Image (tube, helix red, strand yellow):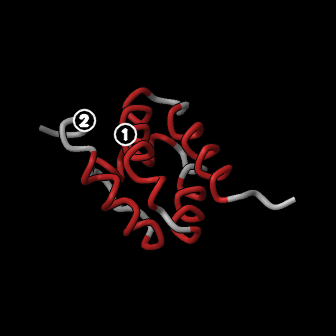
Amino acid sequence: MTETIDTKRKRLHMRSIRRGIKEMDLILTAFATAELGTMDQADLDVYDALLSENDHDLYQWVSGISAEPAHYRAIMERIRAGAVGVTKP
């Protein structure tokens, strides 16, 4: 059975709001709420893979402490754009 795009969006939203650290809960919940509805299958696949990464790595990528892998760069730029105020003033 293949997952529909709507089901995938709902699953990714749930994975976004239930993270390991509170900062990532806030950042990814806001991103998921704003962006998942307009993302195509390819973007959803990249975001799905991103959500499998360690929260501490994700937070360092979002906050600019370390650079994300190249295959996540585009989605991380979108996430960072919405994370202002959570990661830095």
Give percent across and percent down for residue 14.
Answer: 58, 37
What mark, if any, has residue 86 been given in the picture?
Answer: 2
Q: Residues within 10 Å of mark 1 (few under 14, many from 20)?
A: some
Q: Residues within 10 Å of mark 2 (few under 14, many from 20)?
A: some
Give the camera-side residue of 79 and 9.
9
Decide if residue 88 is on the left or right side of residue 72.
Answer: left
Q: Between tags 1 and 2, which lies in front?
A: 1
The CA distance from mark 1 to mark 2 is 11 Å
Give the camera-side residue of 79 and 71.
79
Q: Does residue 75 lie above or below 21 as drawn?
A: below
Q: How many marks?
A: 2
Decide if residue 31 is on the left or right side of residue 39.
Answer: left
Secondary structure at badge 1 equals helix
Q: Does residue 49 lie above or below 31 as drawn?
A: below
- Furthest-top residue in this view: 22
Give percent across and percent down for residue 78.
Answer: 32, 59
Type of amino acid under label 1? Ala
Secondary structure at badge 2 equals loop
Q: Quadrant of the N terminus?
A: bottom right
Decide if residue 29 is on the left or right side of residue 40.
Answer: left
Pointers 1 and 2 in contact (CB under 8 A)?
Answer: yes
Type of amino acid under label 2? Val
Q: Quadrant of the C terminus?
A: top left
Say which residue label 1 marks: 30
Decide if residue 69 is on the left or right side of residue 45.
Answer: left
Question: Image point 28% across, 52% down: which residue?
Answer: 80
Give percent across and percent down for residue 10.
Answer: 61, 44
Q: Earlier in the sequence, mark 1 or mark 2?
A: 1
Question: Image point 59% across, 50% down: which residue?
Answer: 9
Question: Image point 53% across, 33% down: which residue?
Answer: 19
What mark, if any, has residue 12 been given in the picture?
Answer: none
- Furthest-left residue in this view: 89
